[in-house]
Image (tube, rainbow, N blue to C red):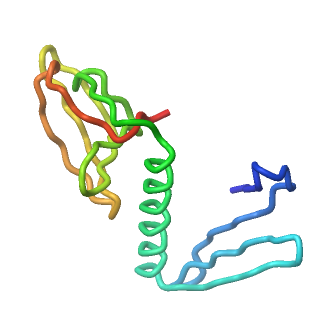
């Protein structure tokens, strides 16, 4: 995975995440060198969740007002408006029924059925 500073145009650096024995290693390349962290799988999941929630908050703070769409118009990546982040993972339309698979910020998934015309308020639209 490559990353870079889009604001300053600084060259992209490296971010590598790999399993190492019973742990997870995170290596970050910076202009001044490299940083390496090793953590347990549980801590890596906590970090991933924290990063995802922080990204959700940053995007929602920068986004406009919530938008309401029909359940049949939901798409992968849409985030439902509410207390907790719920992201659309999959959508399947079966006649007048929308089968929506949601994913929580903690990585849990579940399915819900909606009338295809049901109105769903989104914090932001997926890409």
Report the side of 77 relative to 127 (left or right): left
Pick the residue in front: 52 or 20: 52
Instruction: Answer with the quarter of the image where residue 118 lies.
Output: top left
Question: In the displayed image of the protein, which residue is found farthest to the front?
Answer: 65
Report the side of 24 relative to 101 (left or right): right
Residue for point 12% across, 33% down: 113
Pick the residue in front: 33 or 25: 33
Residue for point 32% across, 54% down: 85
Pick the residue in front: 75 or 80: 80
Question: In the displayed image of the protein, which residue is found farthest to the top?
Answer: 95
Which quadrant of the figure contains the N terminus? bottom right
For the image shown, how many numbered marks are present on the structure?
0
Is residue 66 placed above or below 94 in the rendered structure?
Answer: below
Is residue 101 placed above or below 72 in the rendered structure?
Answer: below
Is residue 53 placed above or below 8 in the rendered structure?
Answer: below
Relative image position of residue 66 (x, y in whole percent): 34, 36
Relative image position of residue 63 (x, y in whole percent): 47, 41
Instruction: Answer with the quarter of the image where residue 36 lies.
Output: bottom right
Instruction: Answer with the quarter of the image where residue 29 lies.
Output: bottom right
Relative image position of residue 112 (x, y in whole percent): 15, 40
């Amino acid at each position: 995975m490559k990353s870079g500073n889009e604001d300053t145009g600084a060259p992209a650096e490296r971010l590598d995440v790999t399993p190492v024995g019973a742990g997870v290693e995170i290596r970050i390349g910076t202009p001044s060198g490299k940083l390496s962290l090793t953590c347990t799988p549980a801590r890596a999941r906590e970090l991933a969740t924290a990063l995802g929630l922080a990204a959700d908050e940053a995007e929602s703070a920068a986004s406009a007002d919530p938008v309401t769409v029909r359940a049949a118009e939901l798409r992968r990546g849409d985030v439902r408006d509410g207390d907790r982040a719920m992201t659309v993972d999959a959508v399947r339309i079966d006649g007048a029924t929308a089968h929506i698979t949601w994913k929580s910020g903690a990585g849990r998934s579940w399915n819900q059925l909606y009338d295809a015309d049901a109105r769903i308020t989104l914090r932001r639209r997926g890409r």
